[in-house]
């Protein structure tokens, strides 16, 4: 009898453990989903990009779900009980606080701008009201004199005095209006400059200071149209840093950011003519538009890879070797921009398949 009760108790404990494990799995799945969704909509802030936050969220999600390495760490698979839920929670809380503070600062700056505008407008309205009041007072005095039987000579002097004063007030209003127009013109010029700066900033990648994907999507259409109109050949390079994930996994995302900035700087110095266009295409991938035939662009691309491989990037006490894979193609006469990009992307994947650190150029003529 005691034996049967003991066996029943053991079974109940096993069921309870399985239930607890299933509940923990569900909690891990929920936490990973929340992290991924948060990373997908993360904001670009002053010192970190939304893309960087998304990658860190993805690493935390993989750690919670599959026991993969935590951000900045390289360890073996972690059991369910070993997964750093507290660390993921601390990251999320800190990131959310930073984002709230960033939004608060942005709103405060907007409020200050609106308040400055209101104060300026209030001052202008007050000036107009003051002049209108003085004119009204002068006209009221003349009306009273005219109705009171004042001698003609006195009335004449008052009228002349009123005319002179009203003329001075009119000149003062004209001067104020001119100054106001000049001030508004200056302000409009400033706003135009600020809007242009904002437009440019909206096309710049926050981390690398290269053009971003949005700017590339606009530029590739313009370049393709100019190429078709002029008959001048234009080439597209898609460049991907080899094994970039290993840098993030072994040295951390700060090291990865240094690599991206250094590579971007070297690309700008390599492709520095006015017509060259260099953009961060996404992640560790870059896009370069060149007014050159594919054959001469291939020579330039190979030289670029050699220069990158010959000069590792220093991070703290570590020397990080850099190689890359390049897909290259020249725009065909009847080809759409999307087809051109897809063809170049296939060449990039072919370069990776050949072992990376090489250039694959699609020089095949268009099918007839």
Image (cartoon, grey):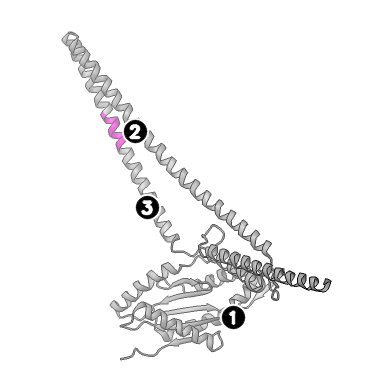
Q: Nearer the viewer, mark 2 or mark 1?
A: 2
Specify the quadrant that holds the N terminus. Answer: bottom right
Q: Which residue is mark 3?
A: 192
- Can you say whether 157 is above or below 93 in the image? above
Find the distance from the CA under tag 2 to the CA under tag 1: 66 Å
Q: Secondary structure at mark 3?
A: helix
Please check the rendered image and state whether residue 175 is part of the magenta-colored stretch, yes or no.
Answer: yes
The answer to whether residue 135 is visible is yes
Residue 178, by quadrant, is: top left
| Tag 3 near tag 2, CB within 8 Å | no
Find the distance from the CA under tag 3 to the CA under tag 2: 25 Å
Q: Mark 2 or mark 1: which comes first in sequence?
A: 2
The answer to whether residue 358 is visible is no
x, y (%) of residue 95? 59, 58
Question: Which secondary structure dominates the residues rendered in magenta?
Answer: helix
Q: Nearer the viewer, residue 168 or 343?
A: 343
Disc marking residue 245: none
Disc marking residue 309: 1
Q: Residue at x 37, y 81 (%)?
A: 339
Q: Secondary structure at mark 1?
A: helix
Please check the rendered image and state whether residue 17 is part of the magenta-colored stretch, yes or no.
Answer: no
x, y (%) of residue 85? 67, 64
Q: Which residue is mark 2?
A: 125
- Can you say whether 364 is above or below 37 in the image? below
In-image side of 16 versus 351 (left or right): right
User: Label 2: few (<14), some or many (≥20) within 10 Å?
Assistant: few
User: Label 1: few (<14), some or many (≥20) within 10 Å?
Assistant: some
Specify the quadrant that holds the C terminus. Answer: bottom left
Q: Residue at x 54, y 64 (%)?
A: 39
Q: Which residues are magenta?
A: 170-177
Q: Residue at x 50, y 50 (%)?
A: 106
């Amino acid at each position: 009898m005691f034996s049967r009760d003991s066996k029943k108790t053991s079974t109940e404990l096993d069921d309870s453990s399985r239930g607890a494990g299933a509940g923990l799995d569900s909690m891990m799945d929920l936490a990973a989903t929340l992290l991924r969704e948060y990373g997908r909509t993360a904001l670009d802030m002053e010192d970190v990009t939304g893309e960087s936050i998304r990658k860190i969220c993805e690493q935390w999600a993989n750690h919670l779900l599959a026991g993969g390495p935590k951000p900045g760490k390289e360890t073996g698979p972690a059991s369910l009980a070993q997964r750093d839920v507290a660390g993921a929670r601390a990251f999320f809380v800190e990131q959310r606080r930073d984002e709230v503070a960033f939004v608060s600062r942005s709103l405060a700056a907007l409020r200050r701008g609106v308040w400055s505008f209101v104060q300026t407008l209030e001052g202008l309205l007050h000036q107009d009201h003051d002049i209108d009041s003085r004119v009204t007072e002068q006209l009221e005095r003349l009306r009273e004199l005219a109705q009171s039987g004042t001698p003609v000579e006195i009335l004449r002097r008052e009228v002349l005095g009123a005319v002179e004063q009203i003329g001075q007030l009119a000149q003062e209003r004209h001067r104020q209006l001119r100054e106001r127009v000049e001030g508004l013109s200056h302000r409009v010029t400033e706003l135009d400059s600020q809007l242009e700066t904002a437009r440019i900033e909206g096309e710049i990648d926050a981390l690398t200071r290269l053009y971003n994907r949005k700017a590339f999507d606009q530029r590739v259409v313009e370049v393709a149209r100019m190429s078709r109109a002029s008959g001048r050949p234009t080439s597209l390079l898609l460049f991907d840093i080899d094994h970039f994930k290993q840098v993030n996994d072994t040295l951390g995302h700060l090291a990865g950011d240094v690599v991206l900035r250094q590579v971007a700087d070297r690309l700008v110095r390599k492709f520095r003519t006015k017509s060259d266009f260099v953009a961060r295409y996404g992640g560790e991938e870059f896009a370069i538009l060149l007014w050159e035939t594919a054959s001469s662009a291939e020579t330039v691309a190979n030289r670029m890879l050699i220069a990158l491989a010959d000069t590792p990037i220093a991070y703290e006490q570590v020397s990080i070797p850099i190689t890359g894979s390049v897909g290259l193609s020249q725009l065909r006469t009847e080809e759409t921009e999307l087809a051109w990009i897809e063809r170049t992307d296939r060449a990039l994947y072919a370069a990776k398949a050949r072992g990376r650190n090489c250039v694959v150029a699609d020089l095949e003529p268009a099918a007839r």
